[in-house]
């Protein structure tokens, strides 16, 4: 399989006053197309910084980062915005949906900035919402949806521009464990059925078990890289006792 | 680009709708500002227009020469105390001063005029036909009397409209006979009304007679000098020739009156246009001042917009971070917030124009002040309010556009 992400000797320093802080100390790895990777590590290990660089929200101090064949290192902020718009979907711990805005319009947001015509925007948003099991709730506003449903709207939003990768930063951090597994089930389905490459930061090792590959960071270095047989989230859900207030 | 503007407008309108009360209060600053500018400039322009109209009514390039004061044994008598000006002076001025176009001697006095059962107290002025030209009179009906009438001391009269109305109550006075001091006069015509003078006098409450007839038959000649006149009305060749004309007249009159160098003039020359132009310029200054004060409130309104936009940017930091992370470019965010600010100011501007127009109507109705709202002042304040939006919206919008997406997303 072709690598969709190629990272080589990636270094990121921050200047904290006089003292430079080395957050990432030379990291190299590749992620294959269609992989489902979880990134783990204690806080301060540099995983958030890495995610920001992977998400083209930040640029490395040195080293190279190629996303889908494009070298991202030297791009301007507007070019990075374009890459984020076309190649990357984001899922956040706090969902980050626009309040007082319907699910459909939230999902349409990335298409707004790619100048997609209104009719096509709506069509693709509805499709993405259906893909995460929210058909019928298109006009609900975030305040009318449960946490799990809100995160599913956010996933639909990350899907809608057909990105090369979806970056999820603690996607289950604000949800209880059952809803977390539901989100994992959606991720696994998208990964398996649509071949979407997923990269997920988590510090919940139970959640990490649903991915195919586990990268472990410590002190700004890659400490472990294990391939694993993922747990099946759908099966786990079926085995859980049915809850009264299922999402 | 243009569809993006529409999208920015939709986002902006939604954001403004979410905070209805706040948006309305922010707009209020602009509404008051624009409304005040329009109403105040309207009041100022109205005052200026009224003064201009009055100045035009007295005639153009007008200089008045009055008999001077005299002091005898230390007692100084007021202007006009001596009959120092004569009809001959008027003729001399007209012929010998190159900067003078026309000079008309006038005498005046109060009389009771009778027609049939009606009578009316008014002012009689004895003049020459040049007076009509100098004062820019036109005839409502009939004709002005001629030089021959003056030479012959003909018993003809020209009525002001107020007099005509009071004696004839609407019927045409031409060729009717009115009695002034027991002398019958044939009415030659009626003057087109001029309205109020800059000093507030009714310029139509007057009867004009040939100066010869007036002195001989109505007012009585001055005992010291049969040819003495009350004043001279002089018209200069052009507005630029006014000062030159005054100098020429002063020299001529001093010579004719044999005033030795170092002694005071026995006449007074006044540039009427200048006197009233001062009034006009003071009205214009008032209008500028009112506009300037009102503009200050528009600027205060703009600061209000800036304030609210800064609050809005801070409140929506996470939203901005999200928009940036899903691919909004800096200019997208910039235009979103700029459109929001301009929408606030333009909407406020439009409402402000309506408020300003209403206010100036109310002012002219209740305070009896004439107000003139020019389309230009409406257009200017509309454009100015848009400008205020751009100017005061730019800083907050720029602040939003240059947020760091990572920090913005983490903002609590």
Image (spheres, grey):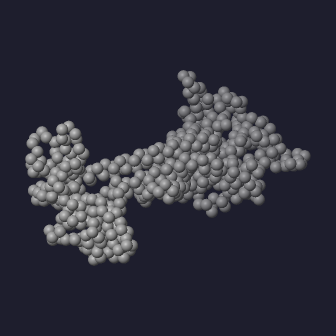
* Residue A214 drawn above or below residue B208: above
Asked where in the image residue B56 lies, by quadrant, the reply is: bottom left
Asked where in the image residue A70 lies, by quadrant, the reply is: top right
Asked where in the image residue A59 lies, by quadrant, the reply is: top right
Counting from the top left corner in percent of width and height, residue A25 is at 60, 29
Q: Is residue B94 left or right of residue B279?
A: left
Q: Nearer the viewer, residue B42 or A122?
A: B42
Number of numbered markers: 0
Q: Is residue B366 left or right of residue A112?
A: left
Q: Is residue B358 left or right of residue B170?
A: right
Quadrant that contains the C terminus of chain B: top right
Q: Is residue B85 left or right of residue A24?
A: left
At 71% from the left edge and 54% from the top edge, which residue is drawn? A103
Counting from the top left corner in percent of width and height, residue B132 is at 23, 65
Q: Nearer the viewer, residue A52 or B345?
A: B345
At 37% from the left edge and 73% from the top edge, which residue is drawn? B117
Q: Nearer the viewer, residue B287 or A197?
A: B287
């Amino acid at each position: 399989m072709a690598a969709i992400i190629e990272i080589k000797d990636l270094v990121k320093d921050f200047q904290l006053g006089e003292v430079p802080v080395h957050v990432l100390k030379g990291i190299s790895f590749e992620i294959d197309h269609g992989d489902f990777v979880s990134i783990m590590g204690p806080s301060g290990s540099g995983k958030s910084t890495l995610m920001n660089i992977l998400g083209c929200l930040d640029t490395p101090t040195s080293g190279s980062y190629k996303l889908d064949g494009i070298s991202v290192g030297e791009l301007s902020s507007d070019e990075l915005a374009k890459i984020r718009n076309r190649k990357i979907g984001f899922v956040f711990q706090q969902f980050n949906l626009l309040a007082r805005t319907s699910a459909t319009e939230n999902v349409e947001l990335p298409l707004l900035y790619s100048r997609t015509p209104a009719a096509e925007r709506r069509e693709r948003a509805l499709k993405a919402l259906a893909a995460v099991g929210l058909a019928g709730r298109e006009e609900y506003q975030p305040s009318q949806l449960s946490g799990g449903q809100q995160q599913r709207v956010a996933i639909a939003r990350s899907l809608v521009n057909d990105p090369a990768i979806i970056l999820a930063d603690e996607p289950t951090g604000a949800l209880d464990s059952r809803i977390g597994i539901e989100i994992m089930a959606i991720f696994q389905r998208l990964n398996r059925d649509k071949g979407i490459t997923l990269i997920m930061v988590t510090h919940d090792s139970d959640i990490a078990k649903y991915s195919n590959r586990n990268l472990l960071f410590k002190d700004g270095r890659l400490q472990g890289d294990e391939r694993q047989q993922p747990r099946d989230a759908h099966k786990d859900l079926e085995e859980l006792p049915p809850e009264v207030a299922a999402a | 680009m243009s569809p993006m503007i529409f999208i920015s407008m939709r986002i902006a309108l939604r954001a403004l709708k979410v905070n209805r009360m706040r948006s309305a209060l922010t707009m209020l600053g602009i509404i008051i500002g624009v409304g005040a500018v329009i109403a105040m400039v309207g009041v100022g322009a109205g005052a200026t227009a009224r003064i201009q109209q009055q100045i035009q009514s007295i005639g153009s390039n007008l200089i008045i020469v009055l008999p001077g004061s005299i002091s005898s044994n230390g007692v100084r008598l007021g202007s006009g105390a001596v009959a120092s000006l004569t009809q001959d002076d008027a003729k001399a001025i007209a012929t010998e001063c190159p900067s003078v176009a026309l000079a008309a001697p006038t005498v005046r006095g109060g009389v009771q005029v009778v027609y049939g059962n009606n009578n009316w107290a008014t002012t009689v002025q004895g003049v020459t036909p040049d007076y009509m030209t100098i004062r820019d009179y036109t005839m409502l009906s009939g004709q002005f009397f001629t030089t021959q009438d003056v030479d012959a001391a003909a018993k003809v009269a020209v009525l002001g409209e107020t007099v005509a109305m009071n004696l004839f109550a609407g019927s045409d006075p031409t060729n009717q006979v009115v009695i002034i001091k027991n002398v019958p006069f044939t009415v030659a015509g009626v003057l087109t009304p001029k309205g109020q003078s800059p000093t507030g006098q009714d310029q139509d409450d007057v009867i004009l007679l040939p100066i010869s007839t007036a002195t001989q038959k109505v007012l009585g000649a001055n005992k010291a000098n049969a040819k003495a006149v009350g004043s001279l009305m002089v018209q200069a060749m052009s507005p630029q020739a006014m000062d030159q004309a005054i100098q020429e007249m002063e020299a001529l009159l001093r010579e004719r009156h044999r005033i030795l160098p170092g002694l005071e003039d026995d006449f007074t020359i006044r540039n009427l246009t200048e006197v009233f132009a001062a009034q006009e310029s003071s009205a214009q200054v008032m209008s500028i001042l009112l506009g300037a004060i009102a503009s200050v409130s528009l600027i205060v309104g703009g600061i209000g917009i800036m304030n609210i936009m800064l609050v809005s940017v801070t409140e929506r930091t996470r939203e901005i971070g999200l928009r940036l992370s899903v691919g909004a470019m800096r200019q997208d965010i910039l235009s979103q917030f700029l459109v929001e600010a301009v929408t606030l100011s333009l909407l406020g501007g439009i409402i402000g124009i309506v408020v300003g127009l209403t206010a100036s109507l109310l002012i002219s109705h209740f305070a009896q002040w004439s107000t003139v709202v020019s389309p230009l002042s409406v257009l200017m304040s509309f454009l100015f309010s848009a400008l205020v939006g751009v100017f005061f919206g730019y800083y907050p919008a720029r602040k939003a556009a240059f947020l760091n997406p990572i920090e913005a997303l983490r903002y609590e």
